[in-house]
Amino acid sequence: MIPLKDDNPTSSTPIITYFLIGVCVVIFLLELSSPNYDSGAIFYSWGFIPASFFHNFEVPSEVYRVTPMATLFTSMFMHGGFMHLIGNMLYMWIFADNIEDELGKTKFIIFYLLSGVAAALTQGYMNTESTIPMVGASGAIGGILGAYIVNHPKAKVLVLIPLGFFSQIIKIPAIFVLGFWFVLQFISSAATSSTGGGVAYGAHIGGFIFGAIAILFFNRGVRRKPARAKKVSKKIKNPWDQA
């Protein structure tokens, strides 16, 4: 199922959410303009490589490289392709505004970055010897989804269920939409565990679990604000090792 929008109103403009989406889009356009994009060298420069982080694996000397610690952050703003970017930004657009609205801008961006770091480390611990770069915002967004399912399990989400000529658009409680997404990550992870690259499902799972737990602490002292009208959304879905 492909989420299109939710009916969960906010009380303020989600400036940080828009900013993060803008940063991801701009960085992706810069990736495309780089002569190192087609060769993949750019992903080895800025992506999170478990073997580098855990075992000091050295990338080729001709590849510019930031420190392994820094890639925990740089990797979450990169994407491996248009569909990867669009799918991630769709989920961000639909679900992040409510979490920002509740936490406030400062706490929200801290929560988002910590979710991305937790996601990358989860994927890394699954195979510390991996030399495949991981890029993408999916892990951090997984944290947002985990927070959303805790704070707004009954919020209705408009989803597209593609069934060929009989595709339907229906409203489903967030707990089922995001619960289905979470279970799908486990199934997909088990089905692809023997392959090398692809989607970093471990990052999705790690980000989601971190978000669902961490939001309980971030919620403390937060006062719910009166809601206002909700925004509209678009469609499309989520897909080097990419988060």
Image (cartoon, rainbow, N blue to C red):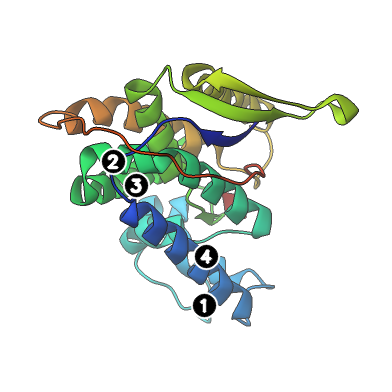
Residue 45 position (above or below residue 96): below
Tag on residue 11?
A: 2
Residue on which disc 1 sits: 63
Q: Secondary structure at mark 2?
A: loop
Measure how far apart labels 3 and 1 are at the Cα level.
23 Å
Residue count near mark 4 (Cα–Cα under 10 Å), binned few <14, some 14–19, many ≥20: some
User: x, y (%) of residue 93?
Assistant: 48, 47
Q: Secondary structure at mark 1?
A: loop
Three-letter amino acid code at disc 2? Ser
Name the residue type under label 4.
Answer: Val
- What amino acid type should be assigned to the residue bearing mark 1? Val
Q: Give the residue displayed 57% in from the left and 73% down from the top.
A: 29
Q: Quarter of the image containing the N terminus?
A: top right
Question: In the rendered image, which quarter is residue 187 located in?
Answer: top right
Q: Position of residue 222 (x, y in %)?
A: 15, 32
The residue mark sitting in front, 2 or 1, is: 2
Q: Residues within 10 Å of mark 1 (few under 14, many from 20)?
A: some
The kind of residue tagged 3 is Val
Labels 4 and 2: the sequence-earlier one: 2
